Amino acid sequence: MFMFNSLLLTALVLVPTWAANVARGDDPQGCADLLPDFSALPNKTSSGKFMILFNSQAVEGGEARLEELVKNIQAFVATGAEPDTLTYRPVRVVDNNGNPTGAYVNIEEYTDKSALVSHLQSAAGCQFLRESPPLIASQTFTVVDEY
């Protein structure tokens, strides 16, 4: 029993660290050319953070893959590899019966605008930037602030 507990403890300590180190690695294909132009946006808002709402509508039949790409980002953020990503919360819009509509909202909070850029340049972020365009029918990106 002691050996099992030691192995379990080792797995609990080392696997998240390993996942963070792998995910943090440079994306061999890069994606700087896919990044939106954020130059007109503030570095921070009056709350001292940089917060966005990303609204998207999936193309019909693209919902599962779009959700998978977003879940990959969510899993990467959960490793702790992005300490400047304070909140990454993707949600689905549902109809009055609780059925998914194919619309999505991501609630994202960063220490500043450069943290968002770093987030998008992670391997999971680059994969999203590369693969999501044909899956998204429409999208809006709104900078918000706490009050």
Image (cartoon, helix red, strand yellow):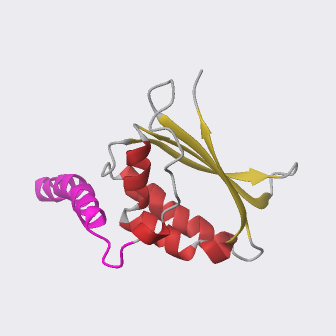
- On the rendered image, what quadrant is the C terminus found in? top right
Residue found 44% across the figure and 59% down from its top? 120
Regarding residue 56, the answer to whether it shows in the image is no
What span is in magenta? 1-30
Residue 26 is one of the magenta-drawn residues: yes
Residue found 19% across the figure and 57% down from its top? 14
For this orientation, the residue located farthest to the front is 40
Q: Tell which of 6 and 126 is nearer to you.
A: 126
Q: Where is residue 7 in the image (x, y as percent from the top left)?
A: 16, 59
Q: Position of residue 101 (x, y in %)?
A: 80, 60
Q: In this view, does 76 lie to the left or right of 92?
A: left
| Image height of 23 relative to 54, above or below | below
Quarter where residue 21 is shown: bottom left
| Image height of 7 relative to 54, above or below | below
Q: Does the magenta stretch mainly form a helix, a strand or a loop?
A: helix
Regarding residue 61, the answer to whether it shows in the image is yes
